[in-house]
Image: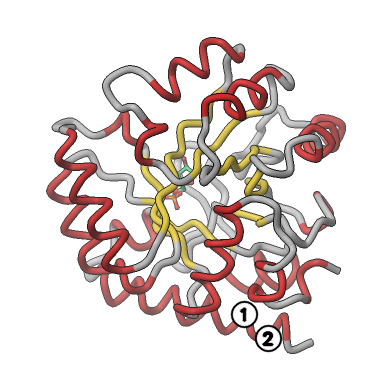
């Protein structure tokens, strides 16, 4: 059972440099919280990350929702990443043919390849998408492959999930882990389970998002890194709420690994 091993042990098993760093950061900072900083103003993003950076292992961006993007925003975000020791995941969910994805990844306004430690990718187009990223990513980069989604009525089937996990096994140096919902989705302890759809206050939104509790996603469903967006971003006091999430999530993890 991969989920019973502590993060520091799993750090020793991985072939992907970002998975190694992320496992190590979690063990050192004692946090498995990923903040999904889904805000559209760069100042608001930087303010929030300044406040909660010390409590998270990973900051997840949707760079294409930022209305006032500049290269300097990235410089400042990366300075915060250095200062607080977290990694940056650009949640781009690439889903095109390999050639197009290699352009989307390393060209254009955002030049994601330049700054994101890892990115999210759909397996839908087939292996070419991973080949493309493998060729254009440098050695300290990672991919979280979408094997399942949190949203109601999504079209991913068990066969699709299984084929996704098989596809990932061909690229051990590239793959950091899976975005997924279930413990049974994969067995390899060197890969990281990133699980979104967590909120303490609510069980769904109006557009199909489904929320589970920290206990459920960590103890039952095998989550390693837990993505929280609006649970923190929309809280009255995001900093205080980030601490609540961090403590609750970490308690579930320590319970899990102590058997
Ligand atoms: O299945 C998924 C995969 C992802 S990456 N379901 C998700 O919700 N996400 C992302 O996690 C989504 O794009 C959003 O940025 C975040 C969840 O945000 P929240 O506000 O619902 O916590």
Residue found at the far bottom of this picture? 258
Q: Do labels 2 and 1 touch, CB within 8 Å?
A: yes
Q: How many marks?
A: 2
| x then y, percent, for residue 144 | 60, 43
The residue to which callout 2 is attached is 255
Establish if 121 lies above or below 29: above
Res 153 quadrant in image = top right
Give the colouring mode of the picture: secondary structure
Q: Identify the residue at horizontal 22%, vertical 39% (top origin).
A: 40
Query: Is the residue marked by circle 1 packed among few (<14), some (14-19), or many (20+) residues within 10 Å?
Result: some
Q: Identify the residue at horizontal 63%, vertical 49% (top origin).
A: 176
* SS for dot 2: helix
| x then y, percent, for residue 16 | 64, 50
Q: CA distance from mark 2 to mark 1?
A: 5 Å
Q: Is residue 135 left or right of residue 40?
A: right
The residue to which callout 1 is attached is 252
- Placement of the N terminus among the 4 image quadrants: bottom right
Residue found at the far front of this picture? 139
Q: Identify the residue at horizontal 78%, vertical 59% (top origin).
A: 183
């Amino acid at each position: 059972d991969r989920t019973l091993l502590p993060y520091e042990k799993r750090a020793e098993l991985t072939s992907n440099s970002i998975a190694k760093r992320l496992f190590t950061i979690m063990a050192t900072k004692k946090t498995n919280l990923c903040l999904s900083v889904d805000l559209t103003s760069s100042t608001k993003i930087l303010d929030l990350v300044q406040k909660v950076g010390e409590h998270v292992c990973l900051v997840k961006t949707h760079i294409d929702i930022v209305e006032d993007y500049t290269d300097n925003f990235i410089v400042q975000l990366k300075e915060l990443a250095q200062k607080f020791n977290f990694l940056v995941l650009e949640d781009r969910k690439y889903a095109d043919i390999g050639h197009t994805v290699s352009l989307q990844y390393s060209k254009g306004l955002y030049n994601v390849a330049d700054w994101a430690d890892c990115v999210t990718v759909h397996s839908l187009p087939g292996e070419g998408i991973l080949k493309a990223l493998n060729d254009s990513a440098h050695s300290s980069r990672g991919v979280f492959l979408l094997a399942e989604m949190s949203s109601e009525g999504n079209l991913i089937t068990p066969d699709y999930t299984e084929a996704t996990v098989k596809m990932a096994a061909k690229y051990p140096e590239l793959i950091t882990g899976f975005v997924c919902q279930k413990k049974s989705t994969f067995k390899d302890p060197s890969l990281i389970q990133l699980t979104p759809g967590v909120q303490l206050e609510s069980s769904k939104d109006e557009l199909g998002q489904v929320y589970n509790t920290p206990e459920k996603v960590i103890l039952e469903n095998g989550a390693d890194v837990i993505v929280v967006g609006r649970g923190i971003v929309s809280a009255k006091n995001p900093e205080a709420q980030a601490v609540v999430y961090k403590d609750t999530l970490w308690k579930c993890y320590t319970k899990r690994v102590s058997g």
